Image (cartoon, helix red, strand yellow):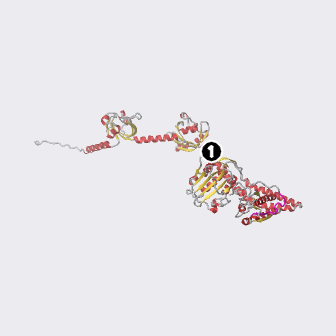
Amino acid sequence: MPDAFGSYVFVIRDTTALVQWDRQSRRFGRISELTSNLVIITDSEDRIEWVNPAFEKRSGWSLAQLRGQRTDAFLPSDFTERDPLPRVGDVPGQAEPLPTERLCRDRHGAEYWVSEDIQPLHDAEGRLESVVRVQTDITDLKSNYMRELQIRATAIEAASDGIALSDETGHYVYMNPAHRRMFGIAADEDIRTLSWVDLTAPEQRERFAAEHWETLRTAGTWSGASIGLHRDDRKLDLDVALTLTEGNDLICVARDVSSRRREEAERARLREELQLAQRRETVAHLAAGVGHDLNNLIAVVSGTVALMEEGCSEDEALASGLLRIARAMTAAGELVSGLGHLARPQTHHRDIGLCEVIGEAVDLLGSARISAHDIRVETPRDCPKVWADRTDILQVILNLAINACEAGDAGANRVVLRVATTGTDLPIREPDAGTIHEGRSYALFSISDTGRGIAPEVRARLFEPYVTTKGRQGTGLGLPIVASILLNNDAAVWYDSTPGAGTIVTVAWPDSGRTSSTIDASRPASHRLGSLSGHNVMVVDDKIDVAEVLSEILEADGAIAIAISDPEEATRLLLEESDLWSAVVTDLEMPRMKGTDIADAATRARPSVPCILVTALPYSTGWDRSVFRHVLAKPVDPHELVACVRSAAEASVADRRSDAADVDPAPKSAARRF
């Protein structure tokens, strides 16, 4: 009997997965609606089924307007590819997204760039069901990228280096203006007919193929020196960098270094000339020192022979022997005199731009010194010209500039080379080396440093040979050589320094023409026996034999001559009893004092006493000849010595009788002493 309530069949289905899938679908849908990315879902025919709000906002189209539309009907710009969807459909089972970039156009016609991932969705049998497109707006990134590309293109076009691109056949597809100018290629010339071979010297092509092509092919890059060929067949020195691209295109960056290499060659030539000149000057100074000692010995022998000749005229054999000795001594003296000239080449003076030669000197100092000492050059708008031998003035500038650099530690010592404006006054005080002539026009330049400075006791001896503050690193000949060059060029230098506060060296150089400071060439021609009678003469020489020989020559002519080997004693006698002396004969180089110091004391004496210099170094430089009435070379000719002493003594007597006690008794000269 059936149950009054009937039967029930319960079917229970587990929908957990469906619920989770529905929940996940709603979540993904919500995410798609909220994401800032642009999402498009199309069917297998590329008809739009759904777009998210972000896409609606960016494109200006609503979902209602887009549903059923094909994407290629409204999305692409006129300048972008067609939609890549056909590629998706052509690949059954495609599961990976297809990234691409495309230029799109919104409802109002404005273009924007998107980066797009295309994800095809397939059914269980592998048939394409739909496509999900996720787009990212990259308009700003693309604009910045295009701007950077434009900047790079502008930089390449404006570059001073030549930049060119050739294809795998070697023919050019691009040249920037600098590359065209470098090789003489007109701006409107079609470069596609040209190959890199056409612009390379034949010997360079062969060398590159043999030595460098394999390196370029394997490493992808090569750089080095090359020889280019201008369209007028002129060869160009080039620095070249080559890069081989993956497509076997060749990028070439070329720099014309022809002028730079000419400048380097000229700089090397100047450096060699300066080094040679420095060596010659050093040899000349050493030779002069040797010559000084030899001339003293020759002077003793020659003077003794001259005295003996007076008393042995009747002994023919003795007179003949003395004559041979005299001739030998004369030849020896001429040989020694020539030592100092052998090392000095002939100079070639001309007008030279002072700023130009200072620039060359700074360049020769080298980039390391320039950087370490922040070397700067300050020049006026109208730079003066100087009358000089280029090597001479370069030596002076380089010596002084190197000394300035070495006057302090690197980084703590700054060096400035400054050219003064035209018309700048000379320093008031006497120069430390060289000479200044009244009425001459000079150009001034200075070299200053912020180094240790120079102590007064050192500054007083700066221009003495072998005096150096550099220890074993210095020769002590740099500044004496500078003094020599300055004196030979009628130029002068002043040192102003404060210990701990740096140094300023000022140089005055003649700006046109040249007036040589030469030894007084006038020699009294007449000589009569007893012409020195009544005159007292002081003879000063640290070699007592030389002083006695010269004294005997003067006494033989009637003078009362006193030989003194101590220059300090001679100075005391001059200052205390100046009215006793008619003239002073002195040597130049002596211990503790120089002949110029004797002459200075004789000038300061009241009344002043005229000085005659008798030296083994008559043509050496670095001292002022103007303080002497006459300059004679050892070995001295006795008649010439007597004539010069008589001339000076008689002039002194005349001056003393002129009642000119208030007139400056210094010897009349256009040159100021140093």
**Could you tell me residue 571's position as x and y percent?**
72, 65
Quarter holding the N terminus? top left
Q: Is residue 635 visible?
A: no
Q: Does the segment drawn in magenta span residue 425?
A: no
Task: Give 447 or 72, whichever is nearer the viewer.
Answer: 447
Q: Does the segment drawn in magenta span residue 533?
A: yes
Task: Give 93 or 231, whichever is nearer the viewer.
Answer: 231
Quarter holding the C terminus? bottom right
| In the image, residue 663 above or below residue 85 | below
| In the image, residue 112 above or below residue 589 | above
Residue under the point 14% across and 42% down: 7
Is 122 on the left-hand or right-hand side of 645?
A: left
| Residue 48 occupies quadrant | top left
**Could you tell me residue 328's position as x and y percent?**
81, 57
**Could you tell me residue 449's position as x and y percent?**
59, 56
Looking at the magenta stretch, what is its main secondary structure? loop
Is 406 on the left-hand or right-hand side of 38?
A: right
| Residue 95 occupies quadrant | top left
Task: Give 514 or 296, whichever is nearer the viewer.
Answer: 514
Is 185 on the left-hand or right-hand side of 664?
A: left
Amino acid bearing label 1: Arg
Q: Which segment is the magenta one?
A: 527-541
| Residue 428 occupies quadrant | bottom right
| Residue behind mark 1 | 262
Q: Categorize mark 1 by other alpha carbons within 10 Å: few (<14), some (14-19), many (20+).
A: few
